[in-house]
Image (cartoon, grey):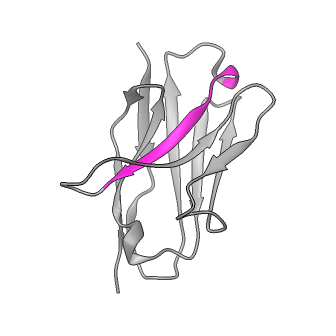
Amino acid sequence: EVQLQASGGGLVQPGGSLRLSCVVSGLEEFSEYGMSWVRQVPGKEIEWVSTAYGGSGGAAYADSVTGRFTISRDNAKNALYLQMNDLKSEDTAVYYCTYGPVRGQGTLVTVSS
């Protein structure tokens, strides 16, 4: 069973930074699989944020976070990260790391002064 556990959320002022982490267990050959971050504001649909591709690598970002967020992975640790800079109030959401349809427990990011 694949399990994902996100952490690193918190309260930050506009313009601030946070780094989210996600530890993945139960997934052999972690490096071969694409992993993503998505976010959800209560009452709204899930929004895709970013994907780190497996294999030879590469990444993709939603337009709303391009230039501010950076996704990375440590395949030796089965870990996924999301560095978030220049945070805005509209980034406030619960953030989840995902593997295909599998979504772990999220971490809340609140951007407010």
23 up-or-down from 102: above or below: below
Q: Which residue lies furthest to the bottom in this view?
A: 113
- Residue 67 image offset from top left, x and y in percent: 67, 67
Q: Residue at x 41, y 36 (%)?
A: 5
Quarter of the image that includes the C terminus: bottom left
11 up-or-down from 50: above or below: below
Q: Which residue lies furthest to the front in this view?
A: 63
Q: Is residue 65 magenta?
A: no
Q: Residue furthest right?
A: 56
**Quarter residue 2 falls in:** top left
36 up-or-down from 93: above or below: above
What is the span of residues highlighted in magenta in the rendered image? 31-40
**Quarter residue 6 falls in:** top left
Q: Is residue 74 left or right of residue 64?
A: right
Quarter of the image that includes the N terminus: top left
Q: Residue furthest left?
A: 43
* Residue placed most toward the observer, 20 or 40: 40
Q: Which is the main secondary structure of the residues drawn in magenta?
A: strand
Q: Residue at x 57, y 61 (%)?
A: 63
- Residue 56 image offset from top left, x and y in percent: 81, 29
- Residue 27 image offset from top left, x and y in percent: 54, 16
Q: Is residue 88 left or right of residue 72?
A: left
Q: Which residue is drawn at 76% across and 25% down?
A: 55
